[in-house]
């Protein structure tokens, strides 16, 4: 049996600048915070991972500050001295010392997979069944909250071959303003690009019934998570009358959530995020259950750096059932990255790293530069 005994685990909070502001239903951000994890083995292998949230704890309850404390005080001590290659055992061990906290666990699991890939000399996609696709077309999240600025951004991205498909954040204005905003965006895009609208669970079932037909009539071609995460029954009723497909995000975190969504026929597609599911292994499990229900998956983002993006792209590259698109744009959207050899974007696609492990390594100077003090 191969062994890679874990000697030490370091965590560092960094704050990276963004190229522009980003509006979510609950907050607006202009920088992005990450917990960077480095796992060292006694044989001298170093694996890296990260966790990030969409601008604080509003989405999942975890924030970079709590993630660092959970890792330093509880999860890292449970892993030190263990064999880094026994990932399933270590996932169980982490669950024994701390309930929930999937973001913190994901950061560690990504670093463990990086170690395993390096030791076995294979890219992480080979640990999940091998390469099915080298690249996938990007869907870009427009989120300036100003239709004119968003249209300009979309046109620039289309003409520079970065993205031809778009997603837009909604739910921070009144429903009437949201409908007008979408109408203006759709007029501006003029049928040249698709538009997915993400309400981040801000509408009631009644509001959705009232306004969704208008959004579809204006040209929005898919809607993401209109109602509260827990209200899967409402999501099923909305799917029944909706003229456009429903993408579930906040409603789907655990394998049990997929069962419920599947049995209720509550979604056409699931938005995966490696942090909300607790890492790549658990995201892979979700993908398999979704496949058994015949539900497609979509690669969503919390705007990861090249570390989290490379990690997720290894799953996108290996899983046929992630066939609904992806929004893995974090490294483009950050004003700086913290790795050597960042993730590559070309011809409207994101490309999988081909080197062993994650395929990216930390730039230690940038880590110190952006470290929170
Ligand atoms: Mn979402």
Image (spheres, grey):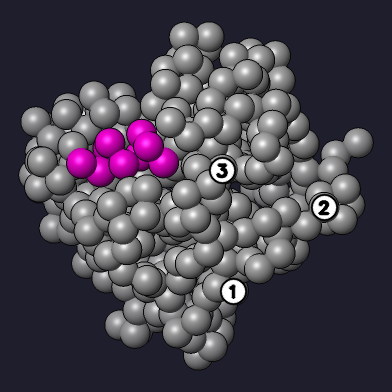
Magenta: main secondary structure: helix
Q: Residue at x 35, y 79 (%)?
A: 193
Which residue is under mark 3?
A: 115
Foreground: disc 2 or disc 3 = 3
Residue 121 is a magenta residue? no
**Where does label 1 land, which residue?**
149
Q: Is residue 172 above or below residue 142?
A: above
Q: CA distance from mark 2 to mark 3?
A: 18 Å
Secondary-structure class at tag 1:
helix
Kindly report which numbered mark, 1 or 3, lies closer to the viewer in this rendering.
3
Where is residue 343? Give x, y as percent.
57, 67
Proximity of marks 1 and 2: CB atoms separated by less than 8 Å: no
Q: Classify residue 114 as left or right of residue 239.
A: right
- Mark 1 to mark 2: distance in Å? 36 Å
Residue 281: within the magenta? yes
Position of residue 11 relative to residue 194, above or below, is: above
Stretch of the chain drawn in magenta:
280-288
The residue closer to the viewer here, 201 or 109, is: 109
Q: Earlier in the sequence, mark 1 or mark 2?
A: 1
């Amino acid at each position: 049996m191969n062994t890679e005994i874990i000697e030490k685990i370091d965590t560092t909070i960094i704050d990276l600048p963004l190229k522009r502001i980003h509006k979510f239903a609950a907050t607006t951000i202009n920088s992005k915070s990450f917990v960077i994890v480095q796992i060292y083995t006694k044989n001298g292998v170093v694996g890296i991972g990260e966790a990030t949230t969409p601008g604080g704890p509003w989405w999942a309850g975890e924030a970079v500050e709590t993630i660092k404390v959970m890792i330093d005080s509880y999860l890292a001590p449970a892993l030190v001295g263990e064999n880094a290659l026994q990932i399933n055992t270590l996932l169980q061990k982490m669950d024994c010392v701390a309930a929930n906290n999937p973001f913190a666990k994901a950061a560690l699991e990504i670093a463990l997979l990086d170690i395993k890939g390096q030791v076995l000399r294979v890219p992480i996609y080979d640990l999940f069944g091998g390469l099915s696709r080298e690249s996938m077309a990007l869907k870009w999240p427009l989120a300036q909250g100003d239709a004119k600025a968003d249209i300009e951004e979309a046109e620039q991205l289309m003409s520079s071959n970065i993205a031809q498909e778009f997603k837009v954040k909604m739910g921070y204005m009144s429903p009437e303003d949201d409908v007008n905003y979408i109408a203006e965006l759709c007029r501006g895009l003029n049928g040249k690009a698709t538009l997915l609208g993400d309400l981040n669970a801000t509408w009631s079932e009644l509001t959705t019934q009232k306004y969704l037909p208008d959004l579809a009539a204006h040209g929005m071609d898919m809607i993401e998570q209109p109602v509260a995460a827990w209200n899967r029954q409402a999501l099923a009723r909305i799917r029944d009358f909706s003229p456009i497909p429903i993408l579930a995000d906040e409603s789907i975190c655990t394998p049990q959530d997929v069962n419920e969504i599947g049995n209720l026929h509550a979604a056409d597609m699931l938005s995966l995020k490696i942090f909300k599911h607790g890492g790549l292994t658990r995201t892979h499990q979700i993908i398999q259950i979704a496949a058994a229900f015949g539900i497609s998956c979509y690669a969503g983002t919390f705007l990861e750096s090249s570390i989290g993006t490379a990690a997720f792209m290894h799953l996108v590259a290996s899983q046929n059932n992630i066939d609904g698109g992806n929004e893995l744009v974090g490294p483009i959207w950050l004003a700086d990255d913290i790795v050597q050899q960042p993730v590559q974007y070309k011809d409207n696609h994101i490309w999988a790293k081909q080197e062993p492990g994650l395929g990216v390594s930390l730039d230690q100077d940038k880590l110190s530069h952006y470290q929170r003090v």
